[in-house]
Image (tube, rainbow, N blue to C red):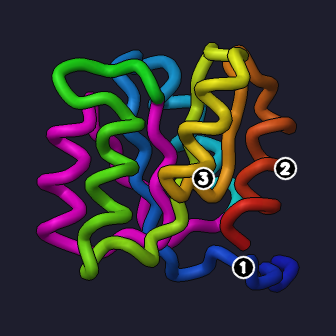
Amino acid sequence: MTEPTKPTPFAGKRLLVADDQIIVRQIVSTIGERLGFGTVDTAQDGDEALLMMRKQPYDVVIADWNMKPMTGFELLRIVRADADLAATKFLIMTARTDKDAVVAAKSAGVDGYMLKPFTPQALRDKILATAA
């Protein structure tokens, strides 16, 4: 007899992970799946993420700041300016520790800011604090 699974705050919700490094996409996707997201999709840059977001809604987006051709920061600004996407929870990941980056992200409307490198537990905690 199997134990009933407890519903999570993310049951049935959609997560999009945008990062130009495949290993980061895999790690973040695995954490999203373990948190109980109903759907976890990935994009290799901000352009691809935006196309995906315009085709179907996502509840949470986790994006790397530094991608080309469109950065995660640029994606954040576009998402917040688009009435159809603006309510999406947005977590940005970056190795940038300078105060200007944090201020810029907060001013642009980011919901959470995660420094790289991170542990899986730290990312899990940040997702729960940001998007639950």
Give the magenta-colored segment's residue range: 36-64
Location of mark 3 (residue): 32
Depicted 19 relative to depicted 60: above or below: above
Q: Which residue is mark 2?
A: 125
Say the numbered circle drawn on residue 97. none
Q: Earlier in the sequence, mark 3 or mark 2?
A: 3
- Residue 106 appears left or right of 60: right
Res. 1 in view: no
Distance Cα–Cα, label 3 vs label 1: 12 Å
Residue 67, above or below 32:
above
Rendered-image quadrant of the N terminus = bottom right
Alpha carbon distance from label 3 to label 2:
11 Å
Q: Earlier in the sequence, mark 3 or mark 1?
A: 1
Residue drawn 56% across the image and 50% down it: 107
Is residue 98 visible in the rendered image? The answer is: yes
| Residue 13 at x, y percent in the picture | 50, 76
12 part of magenta stretch: no
Q: Are marks 3 and 1 in contact (CB under 8 Å)?
A: no
Name the residue carrying label 1.
Answer: 9
**Which is nearer the eye, 104 or 4?**
104
Query: Type of residue at label 3?
Result: Gly
